[in-house]
């Protein structure tokens, strides 16, 4: 996971625990986490609890030597370089959130050619086609998520072209569905459709006007009356 706040919903400590508990996954790959800010003490109680849990997991599973925890990166260019380094070493990107509304980091990772494993709850489930352009993982079934990673890395170890296949599948998915050109074309289309229906139905947004008039009558008119008039000197 890259460049995120360390909170429960992001489930970074969950990923660390999945990794720590799976001996075969630890044999196949190392784990790099980019999250939180280790350089200063957080004032957020939830983040403090997650950081404490992270240190506890490192100790419990003896992760030193297989695990690197880097503070969250605000520099997008530096983040891009981190994605590329992992990609060059034939690694993968994991987004283990309990829920993710869209999944910008998923799009970023796939754009860099990184095979991506992301939560099945929220936007990433629509971005990734399971088994073709990446993998869905269920954050509530961490053992199975870890096994999905094991299966991928074992297949890639036996046949390096398998890693390339998923990498290319992710790139193709992004180019087909998530480029700025596609987004702008869709936005213009929706704008045109709205403009057409507004023209042919003579839409004057009466409901919105009545709603605003109700607020004015009940609340704002009294507030307006209470404002003293300006006194000319």
Image (cartoon, rainbow, N blue to C red):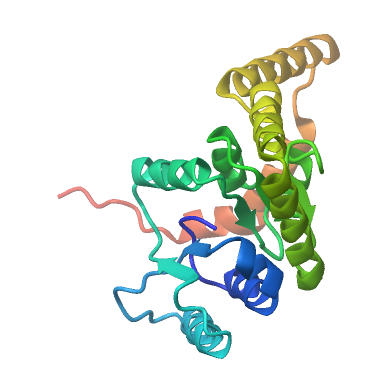
Q: Is residue 75 left or right of residue 33?
A: left
Q: Residue at x 56, y 33 (%)?
A: 111
Q: Quadrant of residue 21?
A: bottom right
Count of numbered circles in the view: 0
Q: Is residue 90 left or right of residue 116?
A: left
Q: Quadrant of residue 188?
A: top right
Q: Quadrant of residue 176?
A: top right
Q: Residue placed farthest to the right in the image?
A: 201
Q: Residue at x 48, y 85 (%)?
A: 55
Q: In this rendering, is residue 69 above or below 208?
A: below
Observer-nearest residue: 117 or 209?
117
Q: In this rendering, is residue 46 above or below 138?
A: below
Q: Is residue 6 left or right of residue 103?
A: left
Q: Residue placed farthest to the front in the image?
A: 158
Q: Residue at x 66, y 46 (%)?
A: 116
- Can residue 151 be spotted in the picture? yes
* Position of residue 196 measured from the top left corner of the image (x, y, whole percent): 77, 10
Observer-nearest residue: 61 or 3?
61
- Can residue 10 be spotted in the picture? no
* Position of residue 64 measured from the top left corner of the image (x, y, whole percent): 45, 78
Q: Residue at x 78, y 64 (%)?
A: 147
Q: Residue placed farthest to the left in the image?
A: 233
* Position of residue 201 measured from the top left corner of the image (x, y, whole percent): 85, 15
* Position of residue 143 measured from the top left corner of the image (x, y, whole percent): 78, 72
Observer-nearest residue: 123 or 197?
123
Image quarter in which the N terminus is found: bottom right
Q: Is residue 85 left or right of residue 158?
A: left
Q: In this rendering, is residue 127 above or below 96?
A: above
């Amino acid at each position: 996971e890259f460049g995120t706040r360390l909170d429960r919903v992001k489930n970074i400590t969950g990923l660390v625990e999945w990794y720590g508990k799976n001996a075969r996954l630890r044999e196949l790959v190392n784990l790099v986490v980019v999250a939180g800010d280790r350089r200063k003490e957080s004032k957020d109680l939830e983040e403090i609890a997650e950081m404490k849990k992270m240190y506890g997991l490192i100790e419990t599973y003896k992760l030193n030597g297989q695990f690197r925890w880097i503070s969250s990166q605000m520099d997008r260019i530096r983040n891009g370089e981190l994605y590329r380094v992992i990609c060059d070493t034939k690694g993968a990107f994991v987004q283990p959130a309990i829920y993710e509304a869209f999944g910008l980091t998923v799009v970023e990772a796939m754009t860099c050619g990184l095979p991506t494993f992301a939560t099945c709850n929220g936007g990433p489930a629509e971005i990734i086609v399971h088994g073709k352009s990446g993998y869905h993982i269920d954050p509530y079934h961490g053992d199975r998520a870890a096994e999905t990673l094991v299966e991928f890395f074992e297949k890639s170890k036996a046949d390096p072209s398998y890693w390339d296949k998923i990498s290319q599948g992710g790139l193709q998915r992004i180019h087909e569905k998530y480029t700025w050109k596609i987004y702008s074309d869709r936005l213009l289309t929706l704008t045109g459709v709205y403009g057409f229906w507004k023209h042919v139905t003579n839409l004057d947004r009466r409901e919105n006007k009545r709603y605003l008039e109700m607020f004015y009558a009940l609340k704002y008119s009294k507030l307006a009356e209470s404002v003293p008039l300006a006194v000319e000197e």
